[in-house]
Image (spheres, grey):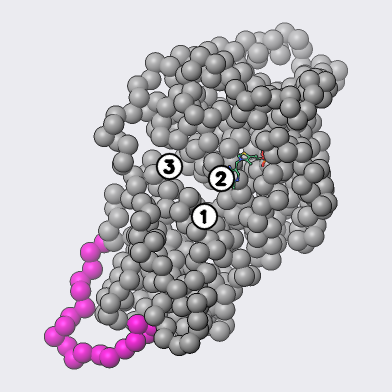
Amino acid sequence: MSPHTNKSSPLQLYRTMLTIRMVEERLAKSHQRGLIHGACHTYVGQEAIATGVCAHLHNADAIFSTHRGHGHALAKGMEPGQLMAELFGRETGCSRGRGGSMHLFAPEIGMMGTSGIVGPCILQAAGAGYSSLILKSGQVGVAFFGDGAANNGAFHEGLNMASIWKLPVLFVCENNQFATEVPFASVAGNSSVAARGAAYGMASIEVDGNDVLAVEAAAGEAVTRARDGGGPTLIECTTYRTRAHAEGMGDFTYRTREDVEQWRARCPIARLKKHLLEHGLSSDAQLDSIEQEVAALTEAAHEFAEKSAYPTAESATSHVYAVSANAPHREAPSTSSATREITFMKATLEALTEEMARNPKIFVMGEGIGVRGGNFATTSGLFAVHGAARLRDTPICERGFVGLAGGAAMTGTRPVVDFMFADFVLDSVGEIVNQIAKMQYMSSGRLKMPVLLRGCIGIGHAAATHHSGSYYSMYAHFPGLRVVVPSSPRDAKGLLMTALTCDVPVLFL
Ligand SMILES: Cc1ncc(C[n+]2csc(CCOP(=O)(O)OP(=O)(O)O)c2C)c(N)n1
Ligand SMILES: [Mg+2]
């Protein structure tokens, strides 16, 4: 798509929806032919949502998505050939063939990734909003997720944080009324997702997710609010997927053919077509020509994907760590001068103080790390120098702020997460292992993950079993994560400085 295309013109909305539909239908056929390795969750029936929202976004705006992400990638501007090649496991795919349907990355266009885990995208979008706050970039973060994700802790923790800090974020819930085979009505005490946004103190709206013009209008307001400093918006889009949860899965044990037919008749593409013709905004000939153009594009994309090579076996383990995993070399502090006797805490505070003064992209999050200066004086004095945005006291939601830190690192800042006690790291392990540690690999090295996670161990007072753990041997098993346990204050200072200047995630205990 040309950078000058007006993405929100009705004809362009039509073209984008049609592209998603035709690519998905081609992919469904490819799945039947055995060309797709792994899952294939199509977006058929839901095209209006990604199209209407992305019409308002620039490349610098960051979207985060979930297992049903093909439509989001295409609406954000990914070439269909790159998407198809990824599903075919080819090296020309958007994730270089290492991800497939559920792991689509194109950070160049602000497609920051899709996750096979339901929920994290909500926290990562909040992280993009946090980066925007620190960098004053005007960038907006967007999370696309299903009704199933609205019952996940990530939803509640993410919305709460975005609301308190007025982050420029759109939370777009695609309520297609089922999570695999489970009806939303059967797992929701209050079946209005929009009402949950209001409960967290943010603007929320429910729209007809099969009406692209309604979605486009709601998203336009939300993006303007976000860019103007008005904070986040939750948009609940009511919709329906008209294919099975994933290709090859049975469909009629939990819903009837008649239900599906009724929703097929509410096709968002046919609806826009009718609107364009009835209002004299287009002609049959013009729409036919768009259809032919998109069909040809889809065929060419398929051909490109099928002809592309598979990645080499040697590349299977590349990008687990950043190539520049080591920080720029610094002179070791002189040992000839008089020795100093300081504590581990003082040594790491010196390192953090120096790096925060040098690098305005560093911010710290944790419980009581603001004015109080941390449970173990790890941030003592820094609030007075740098203020609340860079020394952020958080709600008690370890998973939430670790997930947010991951999204912030993906969008240009360098978060430091300061755990009140190291035992609480365990509450956030999914975000650390499945997201933070794997992000460089999944994005084939295009996203860096400069996150420092820190906590104090060996604290030596009678805190008993929920406040005395360390668990570092366990964390050391996860590829993509560096675990640091210094054995002297001198090492602690140097290693913390290194952790604050390298591109890989570090757990520093
Ligand atoms: C944390 C987590 N639990 C379970 C799953 C398995 N799973 C994959 S998709 C899905 C349903 C998700 O439903 P929803 O969020 O409504 O999205 P939809 O598939 O309807 O688009 C489930 C349970 C998962 N991927 N992640
Ligand atoms: Mg759903």
Residue with the mark numbered 1 = 430
237 or 17: nearer the viewer: 237
Membership of 439 in magenta stretch: no
Q: Amino acid at mark 2?
A: Ile
Label 1 sits on a secondary structure element that is: helix
Q: Residue 134's spot in the image, x, y percent?
A: 54, 63
Q: Amino acid at mark 3?
A: Met
59 or 159: nearer the viewer: 159
Mark identifier at residue 290: none
Distance from the alpha carbon under mark 2 to that under mark 3: 13 Å
Q: From where the camera sits, is residue 89 visible?
A: yes
Label 3 sits on a secondary structure element that is: helix
Please give left or right for residue 384 compared with residue 44 in the image: left
16 or 494: nearer the viewer: 494
Q: Nearer the viewer, mark 2 or mark 3?
A: 2
Q: In the displayed image of the protein, which residue is found farthest to the top?
A: 285
Residue drawn at 46 percent across, 26 percent down: 37
Q: How many other residues sit within 10 Å of disc 3, few (<14), some (14-19) or many (≥20)? A: many
Residue with the mark numbered 2 = 117
What are the residue bounds of the magenta stretch?
Answer: 328-346
Distance from the alpha carbon under mark 1 to that under mark 2: 9 Å
Residue drawn at 77 percent across, 62 percent down: 201
288 or 397: nearer the viewer: 397
Asked if disc 2 is less than 8 Å from ligand 1, the answer is yes
Asked if disc 1 is less than 8 Å from ligand 1, the answer is yes
